[in-house]
Image (cartoon, grey):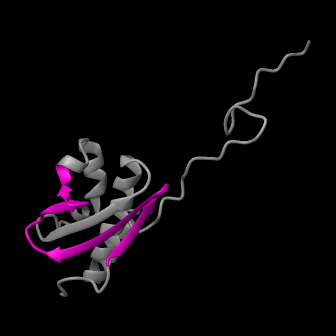
Amino acid sequence: MATTPIKPMTGRRKTSVARVRLVAGTGQIKVNGREFEDYFPRETMRRVAVRPLTVTERMGKYDVQATVMGGGLSGQAGALSLGIARALKALEPETKAELGKQGLLTRDPRAVERKKYGQPGARKRFQFSKR
């Protein structure tokens, strides 16, 4: 088992990008130099972000150092999750099957649809008037 991947793994979600480095340790998580609980105030976002570690039962085994940028907190949590999953797969290839089965190695392609001209939004239309 290697201690660190050669380079940080990248995770993306919506417009957020996360660069993640896993190091053998005690389970400490730092995001942009801040504590994990301070950066992600909601429990659901924290759960989404560390799901690859909980699914593979590696929660206290690695320290996570991440840099996230762009988008909102929800997208950043998703990006962090993908980055952790990719880094975990690079360190321990035997976790690939479990991570893949849970869909954690797939980038979520959903993003905000663009607004179209002549309309108030992406799908919304102005009220139709017959007369």
Residue beneath the point at 30% across and 75% down: 87
Quarter of the figure with residue 122:
top right
Report the quarter where the C terminus lies. Answer: top right
Position above or below: 11 against 74: below
Residues 34 and 56: in front is: 34
Q: For the stretch drawn in magenta, what is the main secondary structure? A: strand
Residue 32 shown in magenta: yes
Position above or below: 26 against 46: below
Report the quarter where the N terminus lies. Answer: bottom left
- Residue 122 appears in view: yes
Residue 96 percent location from the top left of the image:
34, 76
Quarter of the figure with residue 79:
bottom left
Residue beneath the point at 29% across and 86% down: 6
Q: Is residue 70 left or right of residue 117?
A: left
Q: Is residue 48 left or right of residue 61?
A: right
Residue beneath the point at 19% across and 56% down: 34
Residue 16 shown in magenta: yes
Residue lying furthest front in this view? 33
Which segment did they paint magenta?
8-37
Quarter of the figure with residue 3:
bottom left
Position above or below: 115 against 76: above
Residue 63 percent location from the top left of the image:
15, 69
Residue lying furthest left in this view? 26
Residue 98 percent location from the top left of the image:
32, 70
Residue beneath the point at 19% across and 87% down: 2
